[in-house]
Image (cartoon, rainbow, N blue to C red):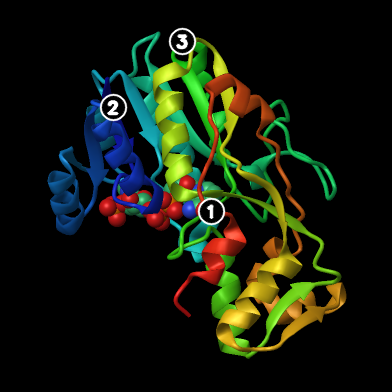
Amino acid sequence: MRVFVTGATGFIGTELVKELIEAGHQVRGLTRSDSGAAQLKSAGAEVHRGDLEDLESLRSGATGMDAVVNLAFNHDFSKFAKNGADERQAIEALGSVLQPGKLLVVTSGTGLVSGGPGHVRMESDPASSSAAIPRQPEDATQAAAARGVHVAIVRLPQVHDTRKQGLVPMLTQMARDKGVSAYVGDGAQRWAAAPLKDVAHLYRLAVERTGPGVTVYHAVQEEGVALRDIAATLGKGLKVPVVSIPPEKAAEHFEWFAHFAALDMPASSDWTRKTLGWEPTGPGLIEDLEHMTY
Ligand SMILES: NC(=O)c1ccc[n+]([C@@H]2O[C@H](COP(=O)([O-])OP(=O)(O)OC[C@H]3O[C@@H](n4cnc5c(N)ncnc54)[C@H](OP(=O)(O)O)[C@@H]3O)[C@@H](O)[C@H]2O)c1
């Protein structure tokens, strides 16, 4: 298949480009930079220069493709609302040039699913959006789906290897800066997780196997890892004390990150595993954190 990947030079995109090319697909990757272009070329991908804010560059990249995978996102949290709006426009632009029967794969998050604390997020649960996390990638696929473009939504948990682990690096940095590795309350809040290579494999299966309509996948290996266990592992690695912060003091300690630090967002992938025949085999989140260089 001919596949256009945005975010092709990022943490997940780099692994996905490799996975797709090894499986015999032709990949065109989006990048803004010379270094990104060099990386894509050496991986065997076609380079497409462009920017999420340049919708024409997205439309020209996606034109004529069998599938488009959107992984690009600007993670500057000081401009979160703008970046969420840019993502929405980018997905709409990418979908607008795909022919009916072709495939649009959009990245979402298990943290973008409806459900309060204690609720294990399912693929059948609707997406949510909040002022704290102003992203609506799933909603942005509606126009393409209505035209008969096949849509796959991949909801990601904390995607990890020994270099990066979703939102965990924010906790690591905070523990380094403040000299304590902290969690909120009893630390029973759970974050779902999956290893990087298994996530890339899931995207490839989604590219190859998604049929008509809108299909939601959860790229989840571990349903929920307790923040208490994450904080304990970081404390050990950084050789700093592990402490509980009472909920009423969370904003003071975690600052802008307090919303995330208090989130309980476990997620199931039973349906995804059965549907795609996906069986993740990589290390768990705690194992990767234990092998990280501190
Ligand atoms: N990693 C996780 O654990 C995790 C968890 C949940 C959801 N997600 C989501 O999964 C997606 C990929 O995550 P990631 O961790 O691989 O991200 P990443 O490592 O930060 O990579 C971001 C990619 O987006 C591209 N990009 C950034 N701003 C851009 C812009 N204005 N125009 C065009 N491209 C732009 C970058 O490309 P260039 O710099 O080469 O242009 C880069 O390839 C994101 O939507 C992310 O929010 C990730």
Query: Whole-percent x and y of residue 151?
Result: 49, 21
Q: Residue, x 40% and y 36% (percent of image)?
A: 70
Query: Whole-percent x and y of residue 87?
Result: 45, 42
Query: Whole-percent x and y of residue 8?
Result: 30, 44
Tell me, yes or no, if residue 82 can be seen here.
Answer: no
Q: Residue, x 60% and y 49% (percent of image)?
A: 134
Whole-number angstrom distance, CA of label 3 to CA of label 1: 40 Å
In the image, what residue type sits under mark 3?
Answer: Arg
Name the N-terminal-most of marks 2 and 3.
Answer: 2
Q: Secondary structure at mark 3?
A: loop
Q: Residues within 10 Å of mark 2 (few under 14, many from 20)?
A: many
Q: Which residue is labeled 1 in the image? A: 283
In the image, what residue type sits under mark 2?
Answer: Val
Mark 1 residue's CB less than 8 Å from ligand 1: no
Q: Which mark is residue 74?
A: none
Front disc: 2 or 3: 2
Whole-number angstrom distance, CA of label 2 to CA of label 1: 28 Å
Q: Secondary structure at mark 1?
A: loop
Q: Which residue is labeled 3 in the image? A: 147
Whole-number angstrom distance, CA of label 2 to CA of label 3: 20 Å
For residue 124, side relative to residue 170 (left or right): right
Classify 85 as above or below 170: above
Tell me, yes or no, if residue 211 can be seen here.
Answer: yes
